[in-house]
């Protein structure tokens, strides 16, 4: 079914509830407003295939902008709400967006976007406005509450997170001749894999602009469920919301698991999480011990998928399967291969680049060189995002990412394995492992650590963390040094902005 069907069937049902203040957006409100905005886009000259850039926090208007684009045959381009002017302007220009929608909460950056994006002629700001922008609320209020004559299905065009460089638009050929009322393939997948349906209550603890949350939100509204939106993640608050709203589904990243598990046991166990049926995680590998603790706490409802914003890679694994194959991300998808630097497949058990069969029309927007480099040099139908892994007993395991591999004395060291060991140390709240120059070995391993509250940064703490790591993994993989920081540069999605950390140390 489609959003409009649920607006007719359950008009007063909450489509979204905002955690900070309990504000409700009903299905009727979401459907009506998205129709009005779709009418506005059409009246301002936008047509099928045009793009709308959305620069907004987790705001009650966010999904109505998304649905307005989807029901108009337009492509929605979500922009990181924390991005600064240079990156916002770059994405708007690179994507060729003709419309730019933002909020007054981002006015400090948004006010300077119009002069830098001359091709973007529809400029809307909600919750207040500044020079150069039309007031969103007044603009859509002047439009009829009616669907466009031809409600062609639009799509979402994400930009990569930029953790390894400047973000790139991930262009997939939009659906041709498909009506928005037709079933979206991802909705069918979520219904089959995760039991999506009208009775679901989904907690979204992450920013909606990110690839997975925006897709999950679209699917939830397609099946008539309710979306609980956290404006900002807080581990205790997340547990409170699960109990309060009897949440049935949720999606997480491993750092969120770590922070919930770091709560005092009496605090986290005081909340009733028995309503949860599916807790899905992705975005980064989850340390084995952390995931095992989560399964012990929440039961076998933890599901993992491995995928990428900029690729067709996709595997899935349940708790039961994972307990039989700890550390795996599931069985390789059909056509998936592990290949060496020359592009040839390697035997099972041997590490290499993870390639997926290129069964979708995908490219990096305006970057044919980067697009070509993502293809296997021997088998053009295979595509990689640079992840490294291996297959064992029919299951895929992740090792690391191209560009982050540390080469010390000619030996490859994958930071993820070191991070997985260190994060289990009770003194550590968060960790990043990088390679830094070493005159003899080429590179050496450095850990950058955020300590738990009450733990002092000192030479003794550094020595204890190194000793702990050596007790868990091979000595050559352990850090030679540990630096302490107040907070690591994580994106709001939970992903670590590791390239920025590497650049910082290289500049020293």
Image (tube, rainbow, N blue to C red):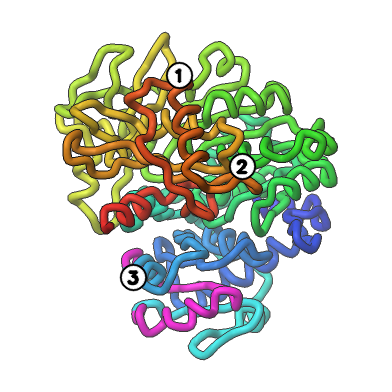
Name the residue carrying label 1: 331
Q: Find residue 91 and report its image quarter.
A: bottom left
Q: Earlier in the sequence, mark 2 or mark 1?
A: 2
Badge number at residue 234: none
Q: CA distance from mark 2 to mark 1?
A: 25 Å
Residue reaching furthest to the top: 393
Q: Earlier in the sequence, mark 3 or mark 1?
A: 3
When the figure is inspected, residue 256 is found, relative to residue 346, above or below; the finding is below
Q: Residues within 10 Å of mark 3 (few under 14, many from 20)?
A: some
Question: Of residues 165 and 236, which is closer to you in this image?
Answer: 236
Q: Is residue 421 left or right of residue 136?
A: left
Name the residue carrying label 2: 256
Question: Of residues 498 and 370, which is closer to you in this image?
Answer: 498
The C terminus - image quarter? bottom left
Q: Earlier in the sequence, mark 2 or mark 3?
A: 3
Q: CA distance from mark 3 to mark 1?
A: 39 Å
Rendered residue at 37%/44% (across/down): 310
When the figure is inspected, residue 206 is found, relative to residue 193, above or below; the finding is below
When the figure is inspected, residue 194 is found, relative to residue 391, above or below; the finding is below
**Which is closer to the viewer, label 2 or label 1?**
2
Q: Residues within 10 Å of mark 1 (few under 14, many from 20)?
A: some
In this rendering, does residue 375 appear at all? yes
Q: CA distance from mark 2 to mark 3?
A: 34 Å
In this picture, which residue range is highlighted in magenta?
Answer: 94-118
Asked whether residue 101 is drawn in magenta, I would say yes
Q: Is residue 386 left or right of residue 469?
A: left
Q: Residues within 10 Å of mark 2 (few under 14, many from 20)?
A: many
Rendered residue at 41%/33% (across/down): 416
Name the residue carrying label 3: 93
Percent coordinates x, y for residue 254 in the rendering:
56, 37
């Amino acid at each position: 079914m489609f959003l409009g069907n649920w607006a007719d069937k359950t008009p007063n049902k909450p489509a979204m509830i905002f955690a900070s203040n309990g504000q409700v957006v009903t299905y009727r409100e979401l459907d009506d407003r998205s129709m009005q905005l779709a009418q506005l886009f059409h009246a301002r000259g936008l047509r099928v295939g045009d793009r709308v850039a959305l620069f907004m926090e987790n705001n009650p208007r966010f999904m109505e902008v998304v649905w307005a684009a989807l029901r108009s045959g337009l492509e929605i381009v979500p922009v990181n709400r924390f991005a600064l002017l240079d990156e916002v302007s770059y994405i708007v220009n690179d994507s060729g967006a003709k419309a730019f929608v933002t909020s007054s909460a981002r006015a400090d950056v948004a006010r300077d976007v119009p002069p830098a994006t001359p091709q973007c002629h529809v400029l809307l700001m909600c919750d207040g406005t500044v020079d150069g922008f039309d007031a969103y609320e007044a603009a859509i209020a002047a439009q009829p509450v009616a669907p466009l004559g031809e409600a062609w299905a639009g799509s979402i065009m994400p930009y990569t997170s930029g953790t390894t460089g400047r973000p790139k638009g991930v262009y997939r050929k939009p659906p041709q001749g498909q009506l928005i009322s037709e079933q979206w393939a991802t909705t069918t997948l979520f219904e089959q894999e995760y039991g999506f349906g009208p009775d679901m209550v989904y907690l979204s603890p992450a920013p909606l602009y990110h690839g997975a949350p925006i897709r999950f939100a679209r699917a939830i509204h397609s099946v008539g469920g309710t979306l609980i939106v956290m404006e900002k993640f807080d581990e205790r608050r997340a547990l409170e919301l699960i109990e309060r709203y009897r949440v049935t589904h949720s999606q997480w990243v491993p750092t969120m698991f770590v922070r919930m598990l770091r709560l005092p046991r009496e605090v986290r166990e005081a909340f009733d999480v028995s309503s949860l049926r599916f807790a899905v995680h992705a975005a980064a590998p989850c340390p084995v011990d952390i995931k095992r603790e989560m399964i012990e706490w929440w039961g076998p409802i933890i599901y993992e998928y491995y995928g990428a914003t900029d690729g067709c890679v996709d595997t899935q694994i349940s708790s039961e399967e994972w307990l039989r194959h700890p550390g795996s991300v599931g069985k390789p998808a059909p056509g998936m291969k592990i290949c060496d630097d020359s592009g040839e497949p390697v035997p099972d058990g041997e590490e290499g680049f993870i390639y997926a069969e290129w069964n979708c029309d995908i490219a990096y927007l305006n970057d044919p060189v980067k697009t070509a480099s993502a293809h296997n040099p021997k088998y053009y139908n295979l595509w990689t995002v640079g992840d490294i892994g291996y297959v064992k007993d029919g299951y895929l395991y992740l090792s690391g990412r191209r560009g982050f591999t540390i080469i010390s004395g000619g030996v490859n060291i994958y930071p993820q394995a070191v991070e997985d060991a260190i994060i289990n140390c009770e003194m550590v709240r968060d960790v990043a492992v990088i390679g830094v120059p070493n005159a003899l070995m080429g590179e050496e391993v450095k850990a950058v650590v955020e300590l738990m509250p009450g733990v002092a940064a000192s030479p003794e703490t550094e020595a204890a963390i190194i000793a702990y790591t050596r007790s868990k993994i091979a000595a050559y993989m352990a850090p030679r040094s540990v630096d302490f920081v107040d907070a690591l540069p994580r994106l709001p999605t939970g992903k670590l902005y590791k390239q920025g950390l590497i650049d910082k140390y290289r500049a020293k």
